[in-house]
Amino acid sequence: MNLENVSANKSFGGWHKQYSHQSKSLGCAMQFAIYLPPQASESNPVPVLYWLSGLTCTDENFMQKAGAHKMAAELGVAIVAPDTSPRGDDVANDDAYDLGQGAGFYINATQAPWDKHYRMYDYINDELPELIKQTFPVSDKWAISGHSMGGHGAIMMALRSPGKYTSVSAFSPIVNPVKSPWGEKAFTAYLGTDKALWKEYDSTELLKKSDVKLPLLIDQGLSDNFLAEQLKPQNFVAVATEKDYPLTYREHEGYDHSYYFISSFIEDHLEFHSKHLSS
Amino acid sequence: MNLENVSANKSFGGWHKQYSHQSKSLGCAMQFAIYLPPQASESNPVPVLYWLSGLTCTDENFMQKAGAHKMAAELGVAIVAPDTSPRGDDVANDDAYDLGQGAGFYINATQAPWDKHYRMYDYINDELPELIKQTFPVSDKWAISGHSMGGHGAIMMALRSPGKYTSVSAFSPIVNPVKSPWGEKAFTAYLGTDKALWKEYDSTELLKKSDVKLPLLIDQGLSDNFLAEQLKPQNFVAVATEKDYPLTYREHEGYDHSYYFISSFIEDHLEFHSKHLSS
């Protein structure tokens, strides 16, 4: 296993560690972070929450700013935070913050030059969990969550793989990327103009076809600058309501798109997932 | 009042806000951050914890990484996080991370070129609290805390101004800068070679002369890379023990110098200060 330990910090009795490895799916070196709660050991494997970050983020934003370690340590849940795209000088990029490196959108690109490295769907769905399972004292109970572009990634991946995750949650997710300027720009570049393919990565479209009922929690700030134009939670809520889907959708007066919003409610998400991970 | 609001984020029911203002003591524009808990109002002024950050930090590091807002909101304590030095193109600087901008050491410089702007002692001791008092719904109960260079600043300032703060605490403080390479370098540059002047800004030396007993909490990680060479807590603890000073000094196995250490124990510090702020 080509896994290099980059850093280690004790945190709330457990350990925050960063690792670098050569990714087969992405064809480049990738870094990820893991929080291992104090309960984790070979004789006591712990469940895992995968956290997918938003545009411009790396593995560091969530670990440094979300304030999640305290509750993860209390509940005995590991957290894995991957990067948001392939990286490096050989990897296609764009000057904009919402395309290229830092903006992988958790999909498999089909269009040049992106198709060479941008296979974040395969990385998050297959390669990374396999690596985590082989390397760390974790159980086969997994949940998934994320923020903004990562909220899109979390819900989309959970809906595409019924049975893989016990529960899914998101903060301010891009739930309907085919109708969002961020999604339209990225999907056109990565997937081309065939909108049938776009829909395979769109949570609202996937929910229409879904016949499993996965516990789902979404938190949305009402002072979020991206709410009306980019996020469009009402499109997702409408489908969920029609299908009687087990969605808890909460709106929060005054909160914005930042990590101050995430940190204010992350403990609710950890408790939500822990309940399902241990049942 | 020349105060410009730079940002505002709702956090745990309260508000994190950044402000910019023209500082008289420092002769440049300065930014600071304040966390106002939900209890704060004109009819209910709240006590204030001043937080002094370490080398290279701005007002942002603590607010983003310490995970302090939750407990501050529970206890009803405001937190003020200033920058760590004067800033700007007109302000003397050095390429090293431990001298010049980001490394003010909370002292009044006497040596050129530093004496023109580097008056962080006056800024933190007088100008900033006056501005806070006039602008925000805060009471006249104040406590002070900090990390590393900011731990030096917090203890040093509290010892120099008996009665100003109800309590003082620090994470990994540089408690004896006159015997630390960081302190020796900065004090030589800012204060010159007269070591009698250095001692006026050295917590261990100040404690020897102090005749007030201020509640004092220090947390130190035992895997802190700077412990032996730069921090030297044992020098301070020895004087405190000799004087029967009300110091609680705690050592933590495995913890380092990072914000993961601070976040693991910040709630203890907030509860410690809240007890004294409300008594």
Image (cartoon, coloured by chain):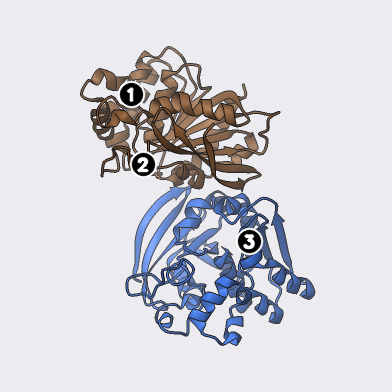
Chain colours: A blue, B brown
Rendering quarter of residue A210: bottom right
Q: Nearer the viewer, mark 1 or mark 2?
A: 2
Vertical position of residue A159 compared to residue A6: above or below: below
Rendering quarter of residue A168: bottom right
**Secondary element at tag 3:** helix
Q: Which residue is mark 1?
A: B202
Q: Quadrant of the N terminus of chain A?
A: bottom left
Answer few, some or many: residues within 10 Å of disc 3's Cα (few below 14, many 20 plus, some between 14 and 19). Answer: many
Q: Chain of mark 1?
A: B
Residue drawn at (48%, 56%) of the image: A61
Q: Chain of mark 3?
A: A
Residue A3 is marked as none
Answer few, some or many: residues within 10 Å of disc 2's Cα (few below 14, many 20 plus, some between 14 and 19). Answer: few
Answer few, some or many: residues within 10 Å of disc 1's Cα (few below 14, many 20 plus, some between 14 and 19). Answer: many
Residue drawn at (27%, 32%) of the image: B186
Estimate the spatial distance between the alpha carbons at disc 3 and disc 2, rounded to whole Å: 46 Å
Q: Which residue is mark 3?
A: A273
Residue drawn at (79%, 74%) of the image: A242
| Pointer 1 or 2: first along the chain | 2
Extreme left residue here?
B193
- Indicate left or right for A93 with A44 as reference: left
Instruction: Kindly identify the amino acid type of the residue bearing the numbered disc 3.
Output: His
Residue B88 is marked as 2
Say whether mark 1 and mark 3 are on the same chain. no
Vertical position of residue B79 compared to residue A38: above or below: above
Say whether mark 2 and mark 1 are on the same chain. yes
Is residue B8 among the parts visible in the rendering? Answer: yes
Is residue B273 among the parts visible in the rendering? Answer: no
Residue drawn at (47%, 44%) of the image: B60
Badge 3 vs badge 1, beta-carbon distance below 8 Å: no
Estimate the spatial distance between the alpha carbons at disc 3 and disc 1, rounded to whole Å: 49 Å
Instruction: Kindly identify the amino acid type of the residue bearing the numbered disc 1.
Output: Asp
